[in-house]
């Protein structure tokens, strides 16, 4: 253990980290920080998912738009997150920087997966739907939904972890008040190693819990959709 004047500087013991975490959870600022960080990151996450799905659907039926957006998305993927954060600090208010960064991280992942799933939808299914006179919405529910769901679910789950990490990183640089990132930065500046480990543990636990929650939501939604499609087929 590295100690200096009886104070753990480089590595805090598990007991000290647990003690600090117990102390922090008893404060109002701790829960406010988690709430506002959660709100920012989830807002950016859902915006990224919505924009990714919408653009994927639009570009799948328009080769011109696909050629237009492809280089932009590729450029966004190649640009370091830190560069986006610094640019965002110039463009927008610091409280909204994490939302913007999370959107940029999630959007291309969802877009790529949904676009790929739409392109790989079996042509035989679409031809059969045309023969049987499926309406557009019925075709979406009965064919495209089942084709897109696996890759869409994978994109949602994999991008959530990146969203949380990038969102907290944006908070560390933007330092909005009442945020997990701000507390991480303050712990580092004040050399409060136990607090730094405690807040890091909070980030990890929240990331895992959110991932499990998204998986559960997607699983339940898929079950409802399957029941709905089954009922439609029975009625027809």
Image (tube, grey):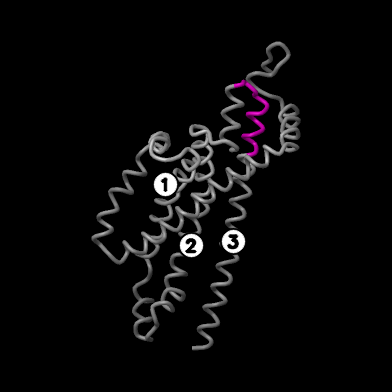
Which mark is in front, 3 or 2? 3
User: Magenta residues?
Assistant: 190-202
Q: Which mark is residue 122?
A: none
Q: Which residue sits at x=38%, y=39%? A: 91
- The mark tally for this picture is 3
Work out which residue is located at the far front of the displayed protein and give it. 93
Q: Is residue 106 magenta?
A: no
Work out which residue is located at the far bottom of the displayed protein and give it. 236
Would you say 137 lies left or right of 20 here? left
CA gap between label 3 and label 1 equals 23 Å
Say few, some or many: other residues with alpha carbon within 10 Å of mark 1 (under 14 / 14 to 19 / 20 or more): many
Check disc 3 and report the residue beneath it.
Answer: 217
Main secondary structure of the magenta stretch: helix
Say few, some or many: other residues with alpha carbon within 10 Å of mark 2 (under 14 / 14 to 19 / 20 or more): some
Q: Which residue sits at x=35%, y=76%? A: 124
Q: Which label's residue is closer to the chain start, 3 or 1?
A: 1
Check disc 2 and report the residue beneath it.
Answer: 150
List x then y, in percent, for residue 205: 64, 43
Q: Quadrant of residue 228?
A: bottom right
Local secondary structure at mark 1: helix
Check disc 1 and report the residue beneath it.
Answer: 104
List x then y, in percent, for residue 17: 71, 29
- In the rendered view of the protein, which quadrant contains the N terminus? top right
Q: Which residue sits at x=57%, y=33%? A: 182
């Amino acid at each position: 253990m590295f100690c200096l004047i009886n104070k753990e500087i480089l590595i805090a013991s598990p007991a000290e980290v647990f003690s600090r975490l117990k102390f922090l959870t008893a404060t109002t600022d701790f829960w406010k920080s988690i709430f506002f960080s959660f709100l920012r990151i989830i807002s950016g996450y859902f915006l990224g998912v919505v924009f990714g799905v919408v653009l994927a659907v639009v570009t799948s039926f328009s080769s011109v738009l696909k050629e237009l957006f492809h280089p932009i998305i590729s450029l966004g993927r190649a640009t370091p997150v830190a560069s986006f954060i610094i640019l965002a600090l110039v463009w927008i208010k610091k409280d909204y920087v994490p939302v913007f960064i999370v959107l940029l991280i999630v959007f291309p992942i969802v877009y790529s997966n949904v676009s790929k799933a739409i392109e790989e939808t079996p042509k035989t299914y679409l031809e059969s739907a045309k023969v049987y006179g499926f309406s557009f919405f019925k075709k979406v529910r009965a064919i495209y939904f089942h084709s897109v769901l696996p890759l869409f679910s994978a994109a949602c789950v994999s991008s959530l972890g990146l969203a949380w990490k990038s969102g907290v990183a944006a908070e560390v640089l933007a330092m909005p008040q009442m945020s997990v990132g701000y507390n991480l930065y303050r712990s580092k500046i004040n050399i409060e190693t136990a607090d730094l480990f405690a807040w890091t543990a909070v980030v990890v636990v929240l990331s895992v819990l959110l991932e499990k929650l998204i998986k559960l939501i997607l699983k339940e939604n898929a079950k409802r959709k399957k029941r709905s499609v089954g009922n439609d087929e029975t009625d027809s």
